[in-house]
Amino acid sequence: MFGYAGKILYVDLTHRKTRIERISNDFCKKYLGGNGFASSLLYRLNKPEIDPLSPENAVIFAVGPFTATIIPSSHKFIVQAKSPLTNLVGMSLCSGSWGPALKMTGYDTVVILGKSEKPIYLFIDDGSVQFADAKNLWGRDAWQTEDLIREETRDEMVRVAAIGPAGENLVRMACITNDKHRQAGRTGMGAVMGSKNLKAIAARGMKNVEVAKLDELMEVCGKLIKDAGQGATTVRHRTYGTPHCIGIINEKCAFPTRNWQEATSESTKSLYPDVLLRDYPSKHNACWGCPVGCDAITTINDGPFKGTVASVEHESIYSLGPNCDVFHYPSIAKAVELCDRLGVDTISVGSTIAWAMECYERGILTKDDTDGVELNFGDYEAQHSIIRKIAAREGFGDILADGVKRASEKVGKGSARFALHNKGLEFAGYDVRGLKASALAFCTSIRGGCHLRAVAMSLDFDGKVDRFKADSAYGKMVMNLEDIHTVYDSLIVCLYIQSTFEKFGGFGLVSDLYELVTGARITPNELYAVGERVWNLEKAFNLREGWEKKDDYPPPRVMLDPIPSGIAKGARVTKKEFDLMLNAYFEARGWTIDGVPTRGKLVSLGLDDVAEDLEQSEKSQREQKMEGKK
Amino acid sequence: MTRKFLVSDPEKCTGCRICEIVCSAVKEKVFNPSFSRIRTVFTWPDQNVALACRLCEDPSCVRACPRNALRANRVTGVVEVESAKCDGCRWCMEACKFGAMLIHSRDKTVKICDLCEGAPKCVEFCPTEALELRTAEDFSQRTRRRAISTLITGADEKL
C-alpha cells in the first residue's frame, strides 16, 4: 500500500542482529500505524509479568501512514514498551523530526529487543543499521548527545532520539528526546532504553514517500495548511505556545497549585500568556510539516538564569511552577531545561517533587531525609538541586527517581495520602475535582493519570457538560473520545491540529485522506472500530499484567479533600460519584462490571486470539489464588 | 519587467519545512525534502529561514559551469539547466554562495529553483506567509516601512 514504508525493522541488541518483516495490508487497515502498530506488537512480543527494565521488554517505535507526507502536523512517532513506572502499557508520543526521518529510512516501525553488552547507539542510515559505540556519549546529556552524533556522522540532517543520564540511571520517569525540545516524556520509556544500554537511535532517511493520489492530496492539504496556519485557534497556539490557556484554567479554578492543595492562585497571574509574551518574548519553532508551530523557545537574557534556553510547555509550568508553589518564570524555564537535558519527564518530576515538598511541610520528611536540602514549597533552588539528584539517582533523589507512587510507599507515614497519580503515572495539570468528566478520563486512561488519552477537558471547559456534576452519560462520552484520540494517535495526527481536522469533517476527512495516501478505502465507522480495537487490546495487556478495578480510582486527595477556595470551592469526586461514572463507562465499553472485556466484545473487534489469551491468564491467575489460599 | 525573487521573513518562518515537502511533491511527484529546491535552515537557539536561488545578476554558478549547461534567463533571472550538457560535476554547487544548487540523486544532474513559472507553490503553501515573491524595490520599501514604524512606535513609548 502507498503511504506505508511497509516494513518493520527488528533489532536484537543481544545478538547484534537485524531482521525485516513485511507488513500486510490487512495489518495496516486493522491497526493503522503508530499507537495501533506499537500496541499490537507490544501485546504479542512481550510475555506477561516481565521486569520492564529487563532485556525481555521489547521497546517499539512507530510512525503512521501520514508521516512525512504533506498532511499537516501528522509526523509524530510513538514509543511503547511495558512501563517501568506503572508496570502496565507504557506509551509516549513525540513530535519533532525523528518520525519522518525514520519513515524515510524505509521503516514504519522499529522493534528493539534484548540488551547490548556495552553502551551503543543505533544508526539507521537509509535502510542499513549500524551498531555504533556510545562509550563517549554515555553520561552526556540529551542535547550534547544529539550534537555529538551529528558531528560523528558528519551530517546535520541526521535526526537523533536520545536519552540523558536519567535514562542511563534507570530513573523510572526518564524520557526520550529529539530536536532538543521534543520529548517522548511519559511512562519512563527512556529508562527502558537505558536498561538496554541503548543511548540513542539516529536516523538518516533519504527514501521517497509516495502516495496514491498526489494532486488531490495536495489540493485538500493546501486548504488544511491555510486554515491551520492562519486560523484563530492555531494562531493563538503559535503566539502563546501551549501555555495559551493557563489564565483561563486558573480563573476556572482548575490549575493545581501546591501539590493540589489549591486549584487556583493569585500568584499564577504572573504566568498568564499575555504577561509571558510581554516579559519573556519567545520565538516559535515548528515540528516537521506543522503549520501551527506551538513550540515556544524562551531564552532568558538576564538574572541568575541568564542563558537558559527552554521550550516551556503548559504542563511543565503546572508541575514545576505553581504545583511546587514556584511562580518565578526564569526559574521554571531553568527547571525545564534541566529536565530536558538530563532526560526526565517534567510532569512526573514536578509532581513528585511537589509531593515531597508537602511531606516536608508536614514534617513527614525532614532535612535528614533530603540530604540537607530544605525542601520548602516555592524554593526553586532546592527544586533544581533535587532534579539533578533524581537524574543521578543520588541520595534522596534515588527514592524520588522511582516516581511518586513508589516513593510514597517507601517513605510511608501516610504520605501516599498526598500522592497524585493514577496507576503510578503522576497526574497532569488539570484539577479534576471540579472537572468530573475529566476525573473519569484521567483514571480510565490506559497509561495512568493522563489528560491526553481522551482530552475530556473539552467537555468540562466548553460547557458541554456540568463540570461539577457526575453523570453516567460521561461513560459513553469518555469512551468515544478515547477511541477518537486512539485513531489520531495511530495515524499519528497531533492534538494541536485536530481543531482543523474537525472543521473539515473529522473522520470523514481522515477517511478521505487515508484513501488519497494509501489508495485503500477505510470508512469512518471502520476508523472508530480501530480506536476501539486498539484500546481493548491495550486493556487486555493491562489485565494480563494484573490490573484490577480498584486501579482505576482517583487518588485520595481528589476523593477526600474538597477544593478549598475559588469558584470550584467544595468540589471533590466522591466514591459514589466515581462509581456511577466508572460503571457507566465499563457498560458503554461492553465490559463486565469489573472492567474486563467480554469474549464477545473482543471477538467482534477481531481480537479472537486475545480473548483466548485472557481466558487462559484469568484461569491461571485464579489457580494461583487458590494455591495461595491452600 | 522587474524581476521577482523569493524572500523568507525570519520573523515569521518557523522552519516547518512545508516549503520543502511541497517542492519535492511538485517537482518530483514524491515527498522527500532532499529533492527540494528550497531548504530551511535552523540556527540555535530559535532562528529559522528558508533559502532558494537568489537570482544573482551575474550568477557565479553560470560562470563556473565548464560545459555551458547553465544560463540565466534574461527576463526572469531564473537559472535554466540544459540537462543533456550537465554531467553533475558539482562545480556550480561550489560556486554558489547560497547552497541553492541540488544534484539530483536519480539523474545526477543539477536542479535549481525555477520559481514554478512565476507562481511558486512553496509561497502558496507557506502557513505563516513568511515566504513571498517580491521585487527588490517593493521588498526594500517594506523594510523601510517597518523601520519607520519601529521608530514611531519607539517614540510613542518614550512619550
Image: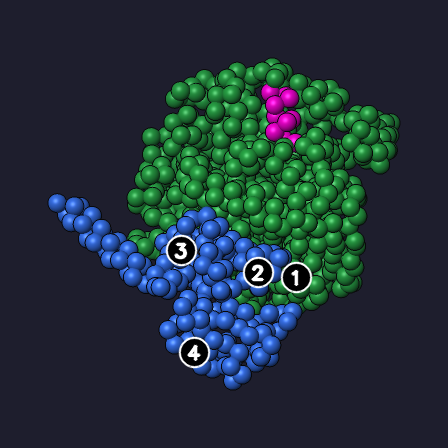
Q: Is residue A477 magenta?
A: yes
- Secondary element at image label 3: strand
Q: Which chain is in blue here?
A: B
> Which residue position holds label 1?
A207
Q: Position of residue B23 (x, y in %)?
A: 54, 58
Q: Is residue A162 magenta?
A: no
Residue B111 is tagged as none
Tell me, yes or no, whether dots 1 and 4 are on the same chain: no
> What secondary structure characterizes most of the magenta part?
helix
Q: Nearer the viewer, mark 1 or mark 2?
A: 2
Q: Nearer the viewer, residue A102 or A498?
A: A498
Give the amino acid at mark 1: Lys
Q: CA distance from mark 2 to mark 4?
A: 24 Å
Q: Residue shown at 42%/19% (left/top)?
A: A569
Above or below, B51 relative to A557: below
Q: Which chain is in green here?
A: A
Q: Quadrant of residue A523?
A: top right
- Look at the numbered discs 1 and 2 and tell me whether their residues touch, using CB distance below 8 Å: no
> Which residue position holds label 4?
B60
Q: Nearer the viewer, residue A600 or A235?
A: A235
> Which residue position holds label 3?
B132
- Look at the numbered discs 3 and 1 and tell me whether their residues touch, using CB distance below 8 Å: no
Q: Earlier in the sequence, mark 2 or mark 4?
A: 2
Q: Which residues are magenta?
A: A474-483
